[in-house]
Amino acid sequence: MTTSTQAAPRLVIAGTSSGAGKTTVTLGLMKALAQRGLSVQGFKCGPDYIDPTYHTAVTGRPSRNLDAWMTSPAYVRETFQRTSAEHDISIIEGVMGLYDGKDPLSNIGSTAEIAMVTETPVILVVDVSSMARSAAAIVLGFQQLEPELNIAGVIVNRCGSAGHYTIVKKAIEQMCSIPVVGWLKRDEDMSIPERHLGLVPAIERGELEPLFQRAADVLLEGTDLDLLLELASSAPPLQYTSNNIVHAGGSDDIEQLPQVTAPHKHNLTDTYQPVIAVARDAAFNFYYPDNLELLEAAGARLQFFSPLAGEGIPEEADSIYLGGGFPEEFAEVIAANEPFLRGLRQAAQSRMPLFAECGGYMVLAETLTDREGKTHTMAGIIPAQVQMQKKLAALGYREASAVQDSFLLKQGEILRGHEFHYSTITYREEEIIHYAYETKGLRGLKHEGYASGSIVAGYTHVHFGSYPEAAKRWVEHCRMYRQDQV
């Protein structure tokens, strides 16, 4: 266990609400800083997969999620410090409004919580369209709601003119005693695309690069970049305790987790590095970097493959990880990849550990009916049919308690995560449903997912940082699977 103290320039870009313009400011700032030759590390508050993809495209390095409810404040501090230490500046994009999160009566799950956990100055983005001095009242209210939060500056968005900016700047600075460091004019061409299906591959192809450049140009027209850098450098030294693996669940306590105890003896040495095959392409791309790194830290070697490119399960695989994404957009291609679907069936029959989340869960079903009503044959491992819906079917944080023992969890053990999907799954009436989890969310308890044999699958996107023992147990079961095959 080591304690480290390091000062690192950093800013949180927060909004007064969703749609205030924080993503535009974040991307413009990241691009502008990168053009100055600075190494920028991006972060996103909360369980989001799309915005980190934007950050990665702009900065050239993987963006990270910071979520103190899914993991813990201690985990967030360690992750933030460890992944930002080698870079010139860190930019953390907020989620929703500054104080919006899991609980309307506290800061849990909010941008404010992350800002306080990481001791990071906040730049508040305010939409000032159709207002003048009232903008000062908004900023003053945000300051007073949480006195411990360091709102260090303001950027005003959707100003009608330079004169409009001058008015709101004077009002805010008079009443709030913090600088208004810049403004963005009304620009209908500057709207960030809705986070629609298929957006991730478009970002990766570079199709949004002109938008990123436009965001930087608009930001630089009216913003004092040097003052922003001064505010970023005013962040205090951040102290954290490193123990490589931290225990989550909302506590600041860091504990060394117990070693995995194998269910039976085996001959394979612990130095054997099992292979986990990870599907990664436009259909399967929702993975927390932390999840992958915790599997590697537990001793696994990850081998990525693309079902959309016609690839099957790698021959050397000891396990399979099917993440979320947009399989419904590519259902016809997936259905035509018989080596992939056959490999999944063979893996299930041989009791290879197979973990699937959301989109991956859907592919394990018998059929997937897309939005146009066309039904596609999937792997058929889970006795159920998936139907896409026009409206959101589930959204929110989840605490997933294991209904039964598996290679991932023992009965009653908990992983935290979130649900976000437009599909529903219907099991055959004659089947006994082997649920994976009992999940707790805002609307109470429900049974969810599927666990049978060597399969664990469900709609919940889990974060292994909430219970790193799960990653260790998974890797140990991979070794046991290989020993059985030997």
Image (tube, rainbow, N blue to C red):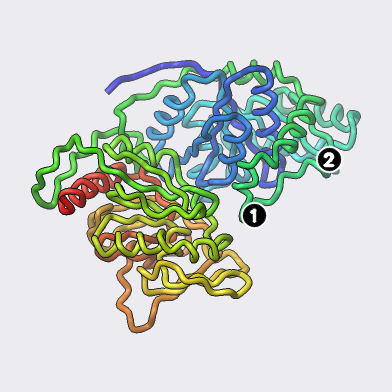
At 40% from the left and 46% from the top, the residue drawn is 463
At 61% from the left and 56% from the top, the residue drawn is 197
Is 111 drawn above or below residue 219 in the view shown?
Answer: below
Is 365 drawn above or below residue 288 in the view shown?
Answer: below
* Element assignment for label 2: loop
Q: CA distance from mark 2 to mark 1?
A: 21 Å
Where on the picture, by quarter, is residue 183?
Answer: top right
Is 178 drawn above or below residue 380 in the view shown?
Answer: above
Image x and y of residue 272, in percent: 20, 38
Of callouts 2 and 1, the N-terminal one:
2
Where on the picture, by quarter, is residue 17?
Answer: top right
Q: Residues within 10 Å of mark 2 (few under 14, many from 20)?
A: few
Image x and y of residue 143, in percent: 64, 33
User: Mark 2 sits on what residue?
Assistant: 187
Is 233 drawn above or below residue 152 in the view shown?
Answer: above
Mark 2 vs mark 1, foreground winner is 1
Q: Badges 2 and 1: C-beta atoms under 8 Å apart?
A: no
Looking at numbered disc 1 in the image, what kind of residue is underneath it? His
* Quadrant location, the N terminus: top left
At 72% from the left and 22% from the top, the residue drawn is 179
Q: Is residue 220 left or right of residue 345?
A: right
Q: Which mark is residue 196?
A: 1
Looking at numbered disc 2 in the image, what kind of residue is underneath it? Asp
Q: Which mark is residue 275?
A: none
